[in-house]
Amino acid sequence: MAEKRRKFDAEFREGAVRIVAETGKSIALVAKDLGINDTTPASWVSRARRAGGDGTLAECEREELCGCR
């Protein structure tokens, strides 16, 4: 039986990105601390860096991540 994919709200995603950006912890360590697969926050951090460069999410990036469009 296939596992159901977990959904993360924008606040959780932004928090994970912020932890990586502000603490200097590795993405893998932050993922482990949050109990999620490390590829998940890696994509969030990558998107945030492309969008803003400082680890925070731009408005368009937030919309893309939460599916608000």
Image: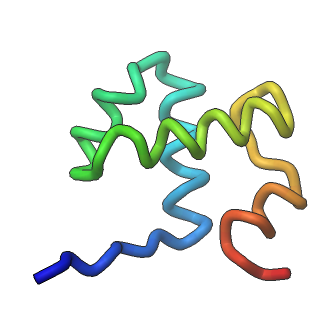
Pick the front one: 8 or 19: 8
Please tell me in which quadrant of the rendered image residue 60 appears: bottom right
Q: How is the image coloured?
A: rainbow
Residue 68: percent from left, percent from top? 78, 81
Residue 12: percent from left, percent from top? 50, 61
| Residue under the point 40% across and 20% down | 25
* 24 w.r.t. 67: above or below: above
Pick the front one: 49 or 22: 49
| Residue under the point 18% across and 78% down | 2
* 11 w.r.t. 39: above or below: below
| Residue under the point 53% across and 72% down | 9
Asked if residue 43 lies left or right of residue 7, the reply is right
| Residue under the point 40% across and 41% down | 39
Numbered-mark total? 0
* 64 w.r.t. 36: above or below: below
Residue 10: percent from left, percent from top? 61, 67
For the C terminus, which image quadrant?
bottom right
For the N terminus, which image quadrant?
bottom left
Q: Residue furthest front?
A: 1
Q: Residue furthest top?
A: 24
Asked if residue 24 lies left or right of residue 66, the reply is left
Residue 20: percent from left, percent from top? 50, 29
Pick the front one: 36 or 15: 36
* 28 w.r.t. 40: above or below: above
Q: Residue furthest left?
A: 1
